[in-house]
Amino acid sequence: MCNIPKDMKWSFSRLQTYDQCPLAFKLQYIDNLPQEQNAYAEYGTFCHSLLERWAKGELMSFELADAYVEGYDAAIREYFPPFPRGLAGKYYDEGLAYFQSFDGFGEEYEILSVEDKFCIDLRGHSFDGIADLILRDRNSGEITVIDHKSKSLPSMKKKLFENTRQLYIYAAYVKERFGVFPALLRFNMFRYGLNIDEPFRMECYEETLDWIERTISRIDADKDWLVSSSGYFCRWICSCRAHCPIGEEIIHAHERSCPE
Ligand code: SF4
């Protein structure tokens, strides 16, 4: 069986969606059903846009906090989940604190590219991506690729190995554009004001390419489209929650097992 349309464009998030819930992948990328927004995604997009404007010289560091406050309500239209309690306020405050104290990414770096949209071939598959920020150390010449993340630190760390594959895909683009692999892969966990750094390792890069091939083969052969069992994800995050034939069932089962 061949599920994959010939013109399918791949990305890290598409493969991650399949790992998260095969049915969600089918609904979004094979059936092409309309996708829903969620507050987490809107928040991430908004904060990315401010960092992009700074990196392009459109906003100064000292203007970021004001731009954040002024643009927040228009940018985040969806509701954050009501639990854990105080989530919406926590996200707002953490973003504000980050932009109030923002002082760039280090004088030792020059910016090579910002929100760089790319399309590359990885083992015969066409991959799209957007590299948030690519820097070069003025002294060593080494390149760092940065992804800004609004995700929670515990969930990031819990699946760090899997999440870092995203940066290995970006590393392939860096090699194609600049001729060398980046020395450092960095997640800018901006809500926490800290970085998660991974030195580039060729064996992890190869593992990422293997994972890509493996996952695409599984998608192509999938007949069952199994579902995510996380009611929280179904209720608040899944982009196709409005069209899912069994999402409601999972959500109700989740709410019965943890009513708060
Ligand atoms: S609502 Fe849940 S089960 Fe349905 S597609 Fe989304 S994640 Fe999968």
Image: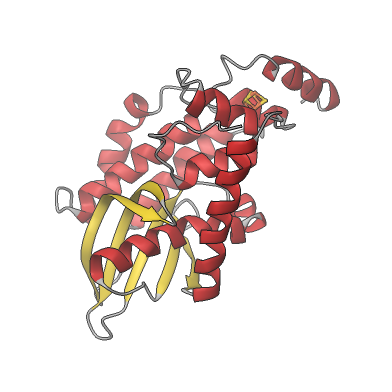
Q: Residue furthest right?
A: 257
Q: Residue furthest front?
A: 1
> Which residue is located at x 60 percent, y 33 percent?
86
Residue 80 position within the rendered picture, expressed as x and y whole percent measured from the top left: 54, 28
Q: Nearer the viewer, residue 161 or 260?
A: 161
Image coordinates for residue 256, horizontal then vertical, percent: 83, 20
Q: Nearer the viewer, residue 207 or 229?
A: 207
In the visual, does 147 lie left or right of 56?
right
Answer above or below: position of 36 versus 127.
above
Q: Residue at x 24, y 85 (%)?
A: 139
Which residue, as the protein is rendered here, is positioned at the far left? 58
Q: Give residue 95's position: percent from left, percent from top.
A: 42, 45
Number of numbered markers = 0
Q: Quadrant of ligand 1?
A: top right
Quadrant where the C terminus sits is top right
Q: In the displayed structure, would residue 250 be above or below residue 52?
A: above
Quarter residue 81 falls in: top right
The residue that appears at 57% across and 14% down in the rendered structure is 243
Residue 167 appears in view: yes
Left-right relation of 251 to 18: right
Q: Compare residues 58 and 131 and report the one nearer the observer.
A: 131
The residue that appears at 68% across and 19% down in the rendered structure is: 247
Tell me the quarter of the image containing the N terminus: top right
How far across and how far down the image is residue 55, in percent? 22, 55
Q: Is residue 103 visible?
A: no
Examine the rendered structure and indicate whether residue 59 appears above or below residue 200: above
